[in-house]
């Protein structure tokens, strides 16, 4: 198989990136836009050692689960991947992906995966959206004297094109956000594009207008953030004020950012009009939302997720909880609100998020929570000195997973109950973390077996290592405390061996 080959493929499943997965004699081919059950003709666009990528040229057989996508921009827009697949089918594939990860990465034989929970809304559910300025038509040509010339046409505000990130699809409506946000988007887009300023060009890193970011709460109040490059004073935006009033914008920020990537929180974020926050309610608790703070993008979906955390902890002795990567404290505070006897320690990188978490706790009348700002991997040892014992860990790390140091520290704590929330279950690290932290008892059994094995083989260094692991897993507070019940089985075996 080589790039350019056209193959007839049967799509078997969906990959984590949303592509269809087909196989030719066990060799995996990711087919862009392919749906399970389809038979397609596809051209190989990239061939690597481990897998290939392909683009559909013809659909030979459709799948009964395929539906008409609601959005006119589906396919060209880089936003949604599965809008043309029945929602029930999307759910069953996502559940299968979790099972596959546990089987293939964590090597579990029959992983006990619970039935998947669905989002209460399939459309209009997003409370946050990031639109980008750019050109709908971008091409590059070689002149007669061998120079490259860029053609940038049709400046607009929309979403990045699928597979062509420097171009922007000219969106007129997005089905994932509310009608209120769509109206604000249309009017702000008109205002920006009517000013005598260029849109930002990702290729040349030139131009003024970069992004329009919006967040909305259940009351329909909107926090608007307009991102531009530097160069214009605040006064330039004065003529925007009447429109903000007309659109009833609750809060408006301006962000000035010259970086080449699109990570605008690295820019200078300035309050421009209205309030400095909007507030959102989740399971009876109130949380403030500022431009850069993390907040789950599907509020009703977050309530389903957080209710599940409360349910999982219901029958677990969990007086002291470590809420790692806690953001503005949402998960810990809904747990603390549901049971005031629990004590929560939250750890979060961003100082601004920790300040928000502290304010949220006051607003929610919670005295059983406390927060620490800093990198988990750095500040955990200090926290563990003050609070050496936790009954439960709640871990909700960023997409890249935990820092190896944080993972090591947590696994050494020997906490037996862990709720791990993963937004990227396919990473090896993510599953390693889950496995390590959620199967402490199995690890313990494995340690017993290895310990007994190495006594037989008289491998002293291995023996010492396992002894240390056993100790950390069972009674971290007292060195080699053989009075702990967890050591009973081992003690009995040792007595027999040494008698
Ligand atoms: C997926 S969010 C979870 C937020 C929160 N649990 C929630 O549900 O709203 C991950 C959080 O981890 C924080 N973070 C990223 N790297 C970190 C680190 N090294 N140490 C501590 N927090 C970190 C981010 O700022 C972000 O707030």
Image: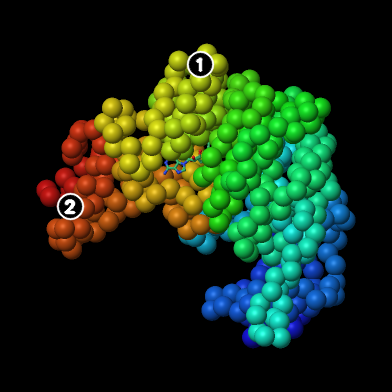
Residue labelled with disc 2: 464
Q: Which residue reaches farthest left?
A: 499
**Label of residue 447 in the image:** none
Q: Quick check: 19 above or below 466?
A: below
Please state the horizontal and vertical placement of residue 117, each as a whole percent of the image: 67, 41
Near mark 2 (Cα within 10 A), the count class, few <14, some 14-19 or many ≥20, is few
- Name the residue: 74% across, 29% down: 241
Secondary structure of residue under mark 1: helix
How far apart marks 2 and 1 lie (CA) works out to: 48 Å
Relative to the observer, which residue lies in front, 190 or 465? 190
Q: Can you say whether 144 is above or below 421 in the image? A: below
The residue under label 1 is 362
Between residue 94 and residue 440, name the one nearer to us: 94
Q: Secondary structure at mark 2?
A: helix
**N-term mark: 2 or 1:** 1
Residue 369 in the image: x percent, y percent?
44, 22
The residue positioned 52% from the left and 30% from the top of the image is: 328
What is the quadrant of the N terminus in the image?
A: bottom right
Residue positioned 41% across, 45% down in the render: 437
Looking at the rendered structure, the number of numbered marks drawn on it comes to 2
Judge depth for marks 2 and 1 and give the one in front.
Answer: 1
Identify the residue at horizontal 67%, vertical 31% (top origin). Answer: 252
* Residue 391 in sight here: no
């Amino acid at each position: 198989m080589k790039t350019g080959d056209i193959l007839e493929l049967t799509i078997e499943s969906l990959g984590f990136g949303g592509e269809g997965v087909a196989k030719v004699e066990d060799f995996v081919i990711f087919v862009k836009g392919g749906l399970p059950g389809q038979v397609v003709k596809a051209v190989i666009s990239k061939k690597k050692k481990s897998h290939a990528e392909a683009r559909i040229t013809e659909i030979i057989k459709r799948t009964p689960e395929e539906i008409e996508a609601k959005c006119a921009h589906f396919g060209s827009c880089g936003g949604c991947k599965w809008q043309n697949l029945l929602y029930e089918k999307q759910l069953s594939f996502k559940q299968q992906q979790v099972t596959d990860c546990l089987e293939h990465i964590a090597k579990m034989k029959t992983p006990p995966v619970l039935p998947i929970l669905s989002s209460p809304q399939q459309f209009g559910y997003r409370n946050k959206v990031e639109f980008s300025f750019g050109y709908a038509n971008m091409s590059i040509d070689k002149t007669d004297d061998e120079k490259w010339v860029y053609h940038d046409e049709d400046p607009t505000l929309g979403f990045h094109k699928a597979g062509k990130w420097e171009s922007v699809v000219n969106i007129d409506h997005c089905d994932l956000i509310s009608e209120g946000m769509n109206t604000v988007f249309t009017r702000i887009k008109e205002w920006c594009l009517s000013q005598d300023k260029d849109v930002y060009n990702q290729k040349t890193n030139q131009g003024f207008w970069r992004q329009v970011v919006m967040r909305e709460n259940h009351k329909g109040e909107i926090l608007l953030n307009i991102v531009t490059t530097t160069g214009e004073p605040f006064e330039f935006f004065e003529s925007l004020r009447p429109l903000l009033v007309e659109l009833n914008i609750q809060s408006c920020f301006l962000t000035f950012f010259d970086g080449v990537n699109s990570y605008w929180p690295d820019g200078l974020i300035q309050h421009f009009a209205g309030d400095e926050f909007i507030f959102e309610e989740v399971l009876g608790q109130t949380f403030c939302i500022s431009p850069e703070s993390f907040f789950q993008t599907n509020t009703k979906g977050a309530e389903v997720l957080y209710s599940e955390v409360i349910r999982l902890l219901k029958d677990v002795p969990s007086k002291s909880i470590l809420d790692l990567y806690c953001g503005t404290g949402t998960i810990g505070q809904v747990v603390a609100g549901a049971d005031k006897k629990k004590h929560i320690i939250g750890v979060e990188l961003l100082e601004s998020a920790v300040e928000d978490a502290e304010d949220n706790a006051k607003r929610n009348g919670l005295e059983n929570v406390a927060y620490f700002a800093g990198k988990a991997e750095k500040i955990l040892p200090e926290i563990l000195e003050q609070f050496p014992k936790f009954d439960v860990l709640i871990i909700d790390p960023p997409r890249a997973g935990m820092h190896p140091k944080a993972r090591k520290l947590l696994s050494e704590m020997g906490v037996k109950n862990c709720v791990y929330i993963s937004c990227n279950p396919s990473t090896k690290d993510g599953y390693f973390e889950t496995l390590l932290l959620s199967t402490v008892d199995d690890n313990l059994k494995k340690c017993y077996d290895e310990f007994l094995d190495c006594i037989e083989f008289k491998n002293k260094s291995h023996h010492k290592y396992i002894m240390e692991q056993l100790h950390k897993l069972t009674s971290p507070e007292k060195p080699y405390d053989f009075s702990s019940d967890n050591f009973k089985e081992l003690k009995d075996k040792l007595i027999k061996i040494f008698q």
